[in-house]
Structures are given as structure tokens and as C-alpha cells.
Amino acid sequence: MGKRVTTAPLPPGALLARYADRDDCYTDCFTVTVDGPVDLPAYVEAFYTAWLFRIERQILGLAGYRSTDVEARALARSGTDRFAAWTVEDRSDSQLLMCDPSSATRSWLAVAPDEAGTRLYFGSAIVPPEPGRDLGTVYRALLGFHKLYSRALLATARARVIRTR
């Protein structure tokens, strides 16, 4: 791993693994490293306040899911369990699993010590509306864009972590 975003298997104990273990769900995992220590609150705040995610927040705001940097900071510091369209599904000291109930998607952020500093993880799950049901052609058609966008989100979050130290 290094300064480039790469695809990776989920690490042991990943909160997202509950969906990766299901045949009817799609899951992915991307990672990148940052020099030095980074805790989960710093990463979560950087992720949700990075310039690229702010564009997504503006689009979500048009759909009635407004959010602010202050709310992102509160989410990062366990001061709220809601942010824009998401709610916290699970959380630990090093991981955050968010759920968007309206679209059956999950977003997962995690940090782990690495010999080069800290490894930042970003992963997603797409969960069918009913267990065992097919995800559908729309989700499959968007997977290429989703993977590219996920890499870009993680890269911009990494840059923001570095800039805000």
C-alpha cells in the first residue's frame, strides 16, 4: 500500500464484513496510507468535509438531506448518530458503519496502524431490499462509476487529513 488508493480485502474484524459474508450483497474496500497517526474522528471529519464529498452533500441537500461541517464534526466525535441521509449502524474506536435506509447502502470508514503510518479504509455495501433478492440492473450498471468515485472520495479525504493536521 502507499499513497495511491488501492482495492483491498476487508481486514479482520471489519464491521462491513457482515455484508461481505452474504452472497446477495455487493461489498468493496479501498485503502490508502497516511504518514503518522490518524484517529477515526480526524478521518471521519476529513472524509465528510473534503471538497468532493461537499459536492455530494449539496446534491443531497436538494433532496432534503442537508448537512454541515459542524454536523460532520459531531458525527466524527460521536456527538450524533445521524448525518445527511445516513444513520450510524455500528461504531467502534477505529471504525464507523453508516446506513442509508432509503437506498439500502452502507458506507464504512476505518483506520488502522500501518508500518508507514495509518491505513485509511473506505468501503461500501449494497444490500438487497429483501434477503436473497437480486440487487438489480441499475446497481450493476452504476458499479463502475461507484468504484471510481469511491477511490476519488478516499483520495480527497486523505489530502484533507494531511492538510488539516
Image (cartoon, helix red, strand yellow):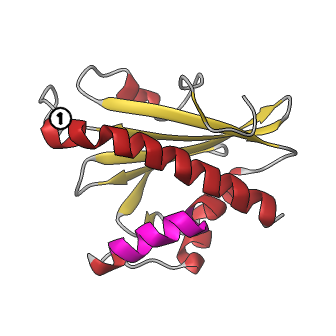
Q: Is residue 32 above or below residue 152?
A: above
Q: Is 157 within the magenta? A: no
Picture coordinates of residue 139 (x, y %)? 22, 41
Q: How many marks?
A: 1
Classify residue 147 as left or right of residue 132.
Answer: right
User: Mark 1 highlights which residue?
Assistant: 135
Three-letter residue code for mark 1: Leu
Can residue 49 be seen by looking at this rendering?
Answer: yes
Classify residue 125 as left or right of residue 30.
Answer: left
Picture coordinates of residue 95 (x, y %)? 59, 43
Q: Residues within 10 Å of mark 1 (few under 14, many from 20)?
A: some
Q: Quadrant of the N terminus?
A: top right
Q: Residue at x 30, y 80 (%)?
A: 62
Q: Residue at x 27, y 44 (%)?
A: 142
Q: Is residue 60 above or below residue 130?
A: below
Give the quarter of the image for residue 31: top right
Classify residue 73 as left or right of residue 62.
Answer: right
Q: Is 55 within the magenta? A: yes
Q: Is residue 93 above or below residue 160?
A: above
For mark 1, give the secondary structure: loop
Q: Residue at x 37, y 20 (%)?
A: 21
Give the quarter of the image for residue 56: bottom left
Picture coordinates of residue 160 (x, y %)? 71, 62
Q: Quadrant of the C terminus?
A: bottom right
- What stretch of residues is rendered in magenta? 48-60
Task: Please name whichever residue, 72 or 158, is drawn nearer the observer in this view of the structure.
Answer: 158
Picture coordinates of residue 73 (x, y %)? 62, 71
Can residue 90 be seen by looking at this rendering?
Answer: no
Task: Please name whichever residue, 47 or 145, is drawn nearer the observer in this view of the structure.
Answer: 145
